[in-house]
Amino acid sequence: TFTLRGEEVVGWTPSAFASEPNIVTTGPHSGLMVLQEEEVLGRALYTDLSAQNRARALVNPRSPANILTVAGREQRYAGDDRGAYVGDMPPTQADLVARLMEVYAVEWLPAPLADIQAARLAANTPETTRFIWAGADLEGDSIYYRFHNEPVIVEFSNVRNQPLHLHTIFHDFGRGLG
């Protein structure tokens, strides 16, 4: 989603990626998994958290059936202080969060918009960013994770039903539609 004011791009969120099924089951690309890195890195982050941060991050042992910041509910987590603060994580985990945020918020954008968005993300300190997890931590189970701070929310939901599907969304409330 891009919002233009004259010739200038002034907004580029929400951005969403989805797939159903998220694993190619036939043909020459059989076994290809959509957004595999995002799922693997999210699982790795959660399973590597300290016991204290895992307890803070886990909001539900079952994952929701979809992302939660759907149209009209984008701001539902404004002021939500649940989750593990990235500032309380060791540098390797904080770097993983930064990498995931970059994947969702920057990599898909054309230059120079990517540079503008990267600078916006860099301005948000880890102390203000929270990581939320719902679902099991076993490979193959449905999962949900979210990063949020005041200007941005990233959600990932991979539901292991029939057929398998996933949704992701990135909101930047300073660069949103409208």
Image (cartoon, grey):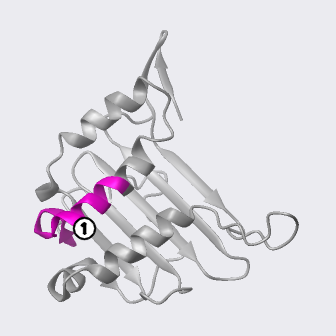
Quadrant where the N terminus lies?
top right
Q: Nearer the viewer, residue 34 or 21?
A: 34
Residue at (54% x, 76% y) in the render: 65
Name of the residue lying farthest toward the top:
6
Say whether residue 77 is visible: no
Q: Residues within 10 Å of mark 1 (few under 14, many from 20)?
A: some
Quadrant where the C terminus lies?
top left
Q: Nearer the viewer, residue 171 or 55?
A: 55
Q: Nearer the viewer, residue 173 or 104?
A: 104
Residue at (35% x, 52% y) in the render: 101
Is 90 covered by the magenta stretch?
A: yes
Q: Is residue 139 above or below residue 39?
A: below
Residue at (24% x, 80% y) in the render: 49
**Residue 152, image x, y percentages:** 30, 48
**Residue 97, image x, y percentages:** 30, 60
Amino acid marked by disc 1: Gln
Q: Quadrant of residue 115?
A: top left
Residue at (44% x, 50% y) in the render: 104
**Residue 157, image x, y percentages:** 50, 69
Residue assigned mark 1: 93
Query: What stretch of residues is rendered in magenta?
Result: 82-99
Asked which secondary structure carries label 1, the reply is: helix
Magenta-highlighted stretch: main secondary structure?
helix
Say whether residue 81 is visible: yes
Q: Is residue 23 left or right of residue 64?
A: right
**Residue 140, image x, y percentages:** 56, 85
Q: Is residue 20 above or below residue 11?
A: below
Is 138 covered by the magenta stretch?
A: no
